[in-house]
Amino acid sequence: MKIKAEIMSQDQMRRALKRMSHEILERNSGAKNIVLIGILKRGKPLAETIRDNILQIEGVEVPVAELDVSSFRDDISEMVVRKDYLQPALDIEGKDIVLVDDVIYTGRTIRAALDACLSTGRAHSIQLAVLIDRGHRELPIRPDFVGKNVPTSKTERVNVMTLNTDGADCVQLVES
């Protein structure tokens, strides 16, 4: 794969996530009822950064869980049904859930995440925060909080790299 451009630097990612944290707090009238759920693989470290930002802004530490949506995908032929798809297991009843993912593309991952959340309990609300929205939706799903909109072609990919997972914070546009 050939890197075409750096879409976001470490500082740009930090600022976007800080802005998104403020927007999440504003939409939810504070942090008291928020639960952040990071979709594996890159959504979890982004959710942890948002949690740290909320702690810095409000002084409240919101719970963070990671979600493996592979059991709920409709576009994978061999599904492995897992009982431990939400870690740690949380009671989401009546909570304001913020699903966090790195990139939204077709919307199928988010549909699977919604199915997983709905199978866990009845949240008060479910919102979506994504660092990059690259378009090309196949389902009528729209994020509530977006770090950056990046129009792409179907031959391009967006790679989000995080310090904990990849050793650097940046977003790259690559030709696949």
Image (tube, rainbow, N blue to C red):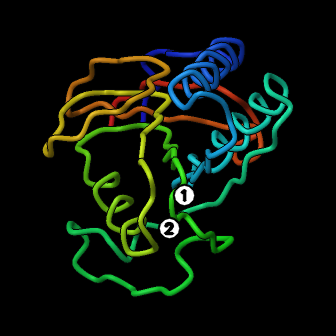
Position of residue 138 relative to residue 111, above or below, is above
Give the quarter of the figure containing the N terminus.
Answer: top left
The residue depicted at 23 percent of the width and 43 percent of the height is: 106
Mark 2 and mark 1: Cα distance apart in space: 5 Å
Q: Position of residue 77 (x, y in %)?
A: 22, 78
- Along the line of sight, the residue nearer the viewer: 174 or 119: 119
Which comes before the other along the chain, label 2 or label 1? 1
**Amino acid residing under circle 2:** Asp
The residue depicted at 86 percent of the width and 31 percent of the height is: 59
**Is the residue under label 1 in contact with that under label 2 (CB below 8 Å)?**
yes
The residue depicted at 63 percent of the width and 25 percent of the height is: 21
Identify the disc placed on residue 140.
Answer: none
Residue named by callout 2: 68
Residue named by callout 1: 40
Q: Position of residue 56 (x, y in %)?
A: 85, 26
Q: Position of residue 81 (x, y in %)?
A: 40, 87
**Amino acid residing under circle 1:** Leu
Tell whether 8 sits left or right of 82. right
Q: Residues within 10 Å of mark 2 (few under 14, many from 20)?
A: some
Q: Quadrant of residue 57?
A: top right
The residue depicted at 21 percent of the width and 69 percent of the height is: 74
